[in-house]
Image: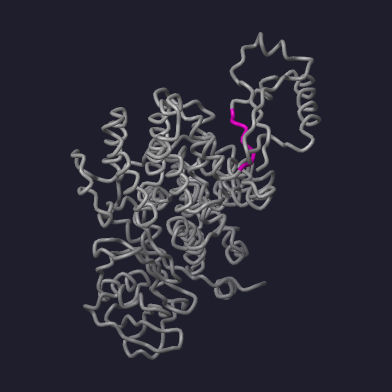
Amino acid sequence: MGSSRLRIFDPHLDRKDSAALLGRELPLPTFDVPYFKYIDEEDEEDEWSSRSQSSVEDDSVDSLLSDRYVVVSGTPEKILEHLLNDLHLEAVQDKETETLLDDFLLTYTVFMTTDDLCQALLRQYPSLTERNDQGKEENADVPCRKRKVLHLVSQWTSLYKDWLHEDEHLKQFLKTIYRNVLDDVYEYPILEKELKEFQKILGLHRRHTVDEYSPHRKNKAFFHQFSLKENWLQHKGTMNETEEIFCRVYITEHSYVSIKTKVSTSAQEILKIVAEKIQHAEEDLTLVTVTFSGEKHELQPNDLAISKSLEATSRMFVYRKDLTDTLNPYAENEESLQRSVRILGINTWDLALELTYFDWSLFNSIHEQELIYFTFSRQGSGENTVNLSLLLQRCNEVQLWVASEVLLCSQLCKRVQLVKKFIKIAAHCKAQRNLNSFFAIVMGLNTASVSRLSQTWEKIPGKFKKLFTELESLTDPSLNHKAYRDAFKKMKSPKIPFMPLLLKDVTFIHEGNKTFLDNLVNFEKLHMIADTVRSLRHCRNNQFPPKENQELKPHVYHLHVIDDQQTLFEISHRIEPRA
């Protein structure tokens, strides 16, 4: 078993002591830690010497005596052992240990399974056999070691909330560790506080009886977990009739209405929503599930449309009553003009606010772990990134919705008003710190099929063109989206980031750095990823006040979308033919 040198330096040295270090190599106390690395070990004397010299030249000892821990790589067991050794129980955690603990808990799924972590924590929890083999001095440290393990478990469950509540390994682990604490609390009364904490975690009563804990007891879900499929969202497990889900009702192969509704919604209720959205007589329509092989099944008015449409390999379509064909929502008719007029009559600030409330409900449900799973694409990541996928899907749908609404407005003067309307909505979304819908609307107006409408853009007033240019500058990708990053950093919370860019940042770190170095976990990489993921917390420090407008809900909850670029271009050339 090899060993490596653990470099330690004190970031809290005073300036006088620090000054004494200038101009000479820093003496570093070392001790052996098997399979654990700090800084770079290759050519360590030369590298450390060069670091010391550069710090002297830069006159910046503080850059060397960093406040951040310096764990670079190690085995999972040794990283965990080091973390437990550095934990403080009575005092507030120092910044380095707190960051290391958070980094470890956020990213452990990258290099070990939940079962591996459970087993490693049990090994760190001193057993009766270990205590008998140890001397008096080591035994005196046993309660402290136990409490540190329990503190880490408490932090783990607090961070993940219900994320792992269905994990059988964790259930068994919590059951085992709880029984261990019950056995130990009489010998070590100091564990009473930790025992109460575990009872809260497990939802137990105060009485110290093992029988009260049932491995079959279900923790109350905190987040609704969904499984994303092509045209619907299904609850992870048994669906509750009051839960709201997303589903797509197709009008053509490349056009659909995205609907947020309850699982218990009947086919007739969904048909009413679609008919109102596409401005078509409800009595002339019917709801049909169509398998990918072409088999059709007409839904009866009282059928639970969601459960019927969730059968494998099927989509939900709206057909004419005689089932002869799907509709043609692209035709120039009075209904399409009526739709655009209705949007123009809505207050822009209120509509932007409703978009913000909708996006916030999705963004606030995203667990930090979803970004980790999304980036590393672990097994089962589809089930573990559902809320994140929802927000990404929403961003894409809003972009397509803006383009669809503009192109489906065949009358030039109304189309000009509609473009002005969306520019104002984008500006309001920015003012409301909803950068997700802001980007989506600006990108929708910049879609090639919309931006080519020269007759439309020529009639846009100068002040609106200037406003749109200012909004576009915020989406400028140059200098790694510097304009957006600077503006977003100045915004106070609560705020909604442009999630695709945040994922790009995490992916860039992931693809630019190896996860393992010489069979050791590259923890420096995981720290950078965790640091990026933690930005979600700052965005959600405060909450948007819940204030929904029932009249505007249909316009935000149910979007008519054309998701085919070729179809969008065909409509674009039809309303404004090439000169």
From the viewer's perspective, tell me whether residue 573 is left or right of residue 287: right
- Residue 221 can be seen in this image: yes
Closest to the observer, 371 or 304: 371
Closest to the observer, 194 or 270: 194
Residue 344's x, y, as percent? 40, 58
Q: Residue at x 69, y 24 (%)?
A: 64
Residue farthest top in this picture: 16
Q: Residue at x 71, y 11 (%)?
A: 19
Q: Read off the magenta span.
A: 68-74
Rendered view: 93 above or below 100: above
Q: Residue at x 37, y 38 (%)?
A: 128
Rendered view: 54 above or below 202: above
Assign the N terminus to one quadrant of the image. Answer: top right
- Is 71 inside the magenta-drawn segment? yes
From the viewer's perspective, tell me whether residue 284 is left or right of residue 24: left
Rendered view: 373 above or below 207: below
